[in-house]
Image (tube, grey):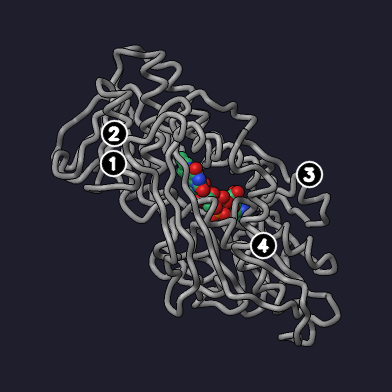
Amino acid sequence: MSDLNRRDFTKIMGAAGTVAAGASLFANVAYAQGKGKLVVVGGGAGGATVAHHVKKQAPNLDVTLVEGQKTYTSCFFSNLYLGGYRSFESITHDYEGLRKVGVNVVNDWATDVDAQKKTVTLKGGQTLSYDKLVLSPGIDIKYDSIEGYSPEVAKIMPHAWKAGVQTAILRRQLLDMPDGGVVVLAAPPNPFRCPPGPYERVSMIAHHLKHYKPRSKLLVLDPKPKFSKMALFQEGWQEHYANIVEWLPPEMTGGGVKQVVANTMEVVSGDGERIKAAVANIVPPQRAGEIAHKAGCAKGDWCPIVPETFESRLVKHVHVLGDASIAKKMPKSAFSANSQAKVVVNAVLAEMTGKKKFPARFRNTCWSLISTNNGVKVGASYKAGAESVEVTSQFISKTGEDADLRQRTYEESIGWYSGITADIFAKA
Ligand SMILES: Cc1cc2nc3c(=O)[nH]c(=O)nc-3n(C[C@H](O)[C@H](O)[C@H](O)COP(=O)(O)OP(=O)(O)OC[C@H]3O[C@@H](n4cnc5c(N)ncnc54)[C@H](O)[C@@H]3O)c2cc1C
């Protein structure tokens, strides 16, 4: 039995960003008639959670969710799919649950935001007006940060850092590669989506190689000298994949991968070494999804927010959450995005329906699977400070833990996945 089942998850997340029923004065009298319009762009971990919970708690509000894709394949647990532990279907979700609770799900891409007129333009030509806008578009890949890399080349050397087609390409390549081939993984510089993600991926690819391509190697070129849960991952790699994984810090490669040559499947390091790859998983630097930039919410690559509400510091009546936001100590994770979503729901409902607003509290836990039944985790609780989200307590798995505890940690993560996807997508 999992330590963290669906009910536990709902309880925890409720406490993390509670929206209570007590009424207070309306912040805006126009909302008093219950005719407010909320538009949410991005139906992933952050945006779909906001749409779900606003509609559930204020059925009279007009809630529209704009999402470009018909189904959502989660990055979270996509590494387990690469390792052969999950099916593609089990990490893919539809929007029927959200439609059933009354969210107007529009399957289109938002192409522009006019913050003066308070409208969102869609690729299909429609214009949506809003009273409040929530943006949770996730990340875009900075293709031009690695010479030779592009959306076209990503079909041959996948990043698989946005899940779906990219993840399926990488899995197919890992299945088809010759035994004895070299897999190269280019890790990204900070900050990026899911700090332990590249290293869980190393573990899952190594697990696959150990069982199906035992003469193969996995080279990890990292531009960072240290990374999340480093001691735990390195202990696990030593124990399970000592002859397979080689992690190369920046001083050994001249700073990581600088160039790729797709037609020869070569990866070139910062110090000029050329590595011939059977599979090249290139994860470049990232930035907030394009629509957040179009809306004027970004400063540099990411979007500054007011920690108490996740309202944009740059554009009024727009909230930005999830990976696109600058939440400082809070990592870019689905758990974080879902937790931030509860705070955004709280803030939006306070303004649009007069519900009492509670102080913002957040939580995050990132689980990673190292080998079969060998799970580790890192996490923290947070509060909103004046300038940034602040840590109030934190925890991390220890090296040398016994197999029983590691198995329970893994089972906890399975309960979490089932709970969070039900919470995001309004699954019964
Ligand atoms: C390999 C990997 C493993 C991970 N593992 C974990 C894990 O174990 N635990 C964890 O908590 N997190 C994990 N993450 C991180 C997690 O996936 C992200 O942090 C999370 O999905 C962020 O939520 P979001 O709402 O910001 O963006 P997303 O979930 O990416 O959602 C953004 C949505 O917006 C849509 N969109 C973007 N632009 C537009 C537009 N203009 N118009 C319409 N729709 C648009 C996209 O199609 C997408 O559906 C992992 C990430 C990776 C890459």
Query: Is the residue 105 above or below the residue 216 in the image?
Result: below
Q: Earlier in the sequence, mark 4 or mark 1?
A: 4
Q: Earlier in the sequence, mark 3 or mark 4?
A: 4
What is the C-alpha distance between the residues marked 4 and 1?
39 Å
What is the C-alpha distance between the residues marked 3 and 4?
22 Å
Asked if the residue at tag 1 contacts the one at tag 2, i.e. Cβ–Cβ closer than 8 Å, the answer is yes
What is the C-alpha distance between the residues marked 2 and 3?
40 Å
Tell me the element at label 4.
strand
Quadrant of the drawing holding the N terminus: top right
Q: Which mark is residue 235?
A: 2
Give the image location of residue 274, x and y in percent: 19, 30
Which residue is at a point 62% across and 68% down the rendered structure image? 344
Please name which of the two marks, 3 or 4, marks the residue nearer to the observer. Answer: 3
- Which of 374 and 349 lies nearest the eye of the viewer? 374
The residue labelled by disc 4 is 40
* Type of the residue with mark 1: Ala
What is the C-alpha distance between the residues marked 3 and 1?
39 Å
Query: Is the residue 395 above or below the residue 198 in the image?
Result: below
* Type of the residue with mark 4: Val
Give the image location of residue 49, x and y in percent: 66, 56
- Which of 405 and 174 lies nearest the eye of the viewer? 405
Query: Is the residue 219 above or below the residue 386 in the image?
Result: above
Tell me the element at label 1.
helix
